[in-house]
Image (tube, coloured by chain):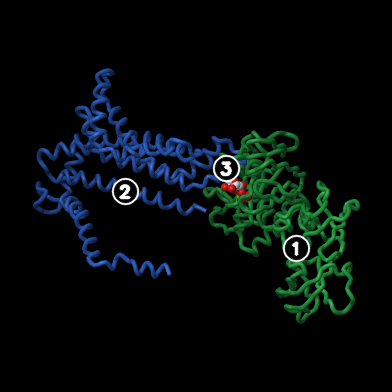
Amino acid sequence: MARNVARNFSIKRLPGFATIAMLCFFVLYLPIATLVVYAFNAGTSIAIWEGLSLRWFASAWQNQQVIDASIRSLQIASVAAVIATACATLAALATTRTTPYRGLTFKYSMLNIPLLVPEIVTAVALLILFSRIKVWTGYSGLGYLIAAHSAFCVPFAYLPIRARLENMDLSLERAAADLYATPYKTFRYVTLPLLWPGILAGLMLAFVISLDDVVITEFVKSGGQDTLPTYMLGQLRRVVTPEMNAISTVFLMLSLAIVTVFFFISRNPQKDEP
Amino acid sequence: MHGIKKWFGNFQAVDDVSLEIRPNEFFTLLGPSGCGKTTLLRMIAGFEMPTEGSIRLDGTEIASLLPNQRPVNTVFQNYALFPHLTVAENIGFGLKMLGRPKAEIAATVAEMIKLVHLEGRGGDPVTQLSGGQQQRVALARALAPRPKVLLLDEPLSALDLKLRKSMQIELKRLQSETGITFVFVTHDQEEALTMSDRIAVMSHGKVRQVGEPWEIYDRPAERFVADFIGDTNFLDVDVVAIEGERARVRLASGAEIPATFPADIRPAGKVTIVIRPEHARAVSTGLSPATPQSVPLSGTVHDVVYLGTDTHFHVRLEDGTNFMVRQQNARSGPCGFAVGDPVGIELSDDVAQILRD
Ligand SMILES: Nc1ncnc2c1ncn2[C@@H]1O[C@H](COP(=O)(O)OP(=O)(O)O)[C@@H](O)[C@H]1O
Ligand SMILES: [Mg+2]
């Protein structure tokens, strides 16, 4: 029965579907494939192929600015991901582990609306706010970037954690309480272990999002605080060599690795649902 | 527990329930779905607070304690086993939370695993077990801390019929071996009659009757109880006299029979009695001159249902009411009466019970 329905409505049979699908893949991945290929170009052009070489990877590896920007990116992303995930975990617990009350939906929306606010608006707002604070305090370190990244990563970290919590049976926590676990012990021995995959997924999502950010970083950073993406943006305005391709390729591999881990973590938990 | 009331908003789920559950007793809350059984159980466990009333355990008021402060454990309907722990870790969870020494926990867990016949499965993740085995783990987990009361909310409803029958026996065995008081919730009357020491029948948030299985079945106090449990015949009769613990009632045919009645009423005038179908026998009217006193009811067979062990005769009495007779098929062969036959109905002694209005 179900099989028949699937057959009747199979989208594969729509005329032109295969063509359009192929075209989409082409448009999505051809540029990326080209970028990766030219990272291995021996010449100085990103358009004319002159043979295979790893020289641009070596050159990027020796470029102090690239190294500094990378380290800065990783620092910001790690700290911001941890802060954002901690906040998101608490927020997710507060919005799911409670009896519904008036205003709960409002809070839930407030947590997610940042996903819809145009990034440029947040960027300008933060620029204005932080410039005030800079004047008052005289502090101009990485703290501003970390604060900004932590803030905009919260909704991203929140999504997988909340999803995980909603799938988790409330009766497990009730069972723990019934078996003499105090609220703290219930959290420690039941909620947290079961929530862990969600938290890890949130952490990685936040990390990737932070690593990737250009707009807010560009507005908030002080002089000499380039992250890898803003450094690359700056370089593109000058000479473009396959070094950019090499950096992008490494960046791409890193993201892919994280996303792969994310995929496996968020898929596996299904197995231990009863 | 005394005078328990529970409101959800302006819906009253439990209405003035007072029950005394005795130590070491297998006590069952029986009633249709939605009548407040789970809510009552959750108040004993501590997941809900009664809006009014008190719950005492061995003389101590517990209605306001948190679930983890009560010596009461629950077997959840969906088992609620911890999926990230093994069978043994699940069973030992309560003792671990109580801070018992490791050696004691290990010993108790081993004992529990034996008690529920899960030898050799202690190290397995609970997710690898079948439904029946998960059920046993849930039981062992709730029994391991040796609670004063074990609460079971329809624990067998997810199992298939055969497994359910064997778990019924298993539960009874566990209860008598451990000596722990069981409070068992079910909507299955047969299950309640088989397993319980005493039963409380509930409907619409109220307890309708409390008693031993035979009392609930043979001496129902209300139409709801009589109707909910088993097949029943209702007859409208007149009370003639009260003689001690029996009333004499006059049937439509003029015959007078004794009838028992609930202790809290004094029947008079027109009342309804119940007679269980297996307490009546269909007899042929032609042979002997039947007096109304020996054959108090008569009518015409309008349906015969043959069930192998029994036959059900649906008889239309002279005044038009339907009366069902369940007769055991003691001999092989056809069952005696056919549709349209006139029959008399004999009653066993002392089988009529007057209902509260
Ligand atoms: N948390 C709740 N909020 C509102 N109504 C509830 C809640 N829990 C139970 N009820 C209502 O109380 C009634 C009794 O429920 P329950 O105790 O679960 O019945 P049972 O276990 O006998 O089927 C039902 O009508 C149910 O809808
Ligand atoms: Mg229920």
User: Within 10 angstroms of label 2, few (less than 14), some, or many (20 or more) residues?
Assistant: few
Nearer the observer, disc 2 or disc 1?
1
Extreme-bottom residue of the structure:
B333
- Looking at the image, do the residues carrying marks 2 and 3 touch, with CB atoms under 8 Å apart? no
- List the residue tagged with mark 2: A257
Q: Position of residue A240 (x, y in %)?
A: 11, 43
Q: Which chain is green?
A: B
Q: Position of residue B298 (x, y in %)?
A: 81, 71
* Amino acid at the residue labelled 2: Ala
* Amino acid at the residue labelled 1: Asn
In this picture, residue A141 sits left or right of residue B61: left
Picture quadrant of residue B239 = bottom right
Nearest the camera: B217 or B242?
Answer: B242
Q: Which mark, by number, is residue A134?
A: none
Q: In the image, are marks 3 and 1 on the same chain? A: no
Tell me how far mark 3 sits from mark 1, CA to CA.
44 Å
- List the residue tagged with mark 3: A174
Nearer the observer, disc 3 or disc 1?
1
* Amino acid at the residue labelled 3: Arg
- Looking at the image, do the residues carrying marks 2 and 1 touch, with CB atoms under 8 Å apart? no
User: Within 10 angstroms of label 3, few (less than 14), some, or many (20 or more) residues?
Assistant: many
Tell me how far mark 2 sits from mark 1, CA to CA.
74 Å
Relative to B217, say whether B253 is above or below.
below
Name the residue rendered at 55%, 37% in the picture.
A185
The reply to whether the residue tagged 1 has its Cβ within 8 angstroms of ligand 1 is no
Name the residue rendered at 24%, 34% in the picture.
A121
Q: Which chain is blue?
A: A
Q: Position of residue A116 (x, y in %)?
A: 29, 40
- List the residue tagged with mark 1: B233
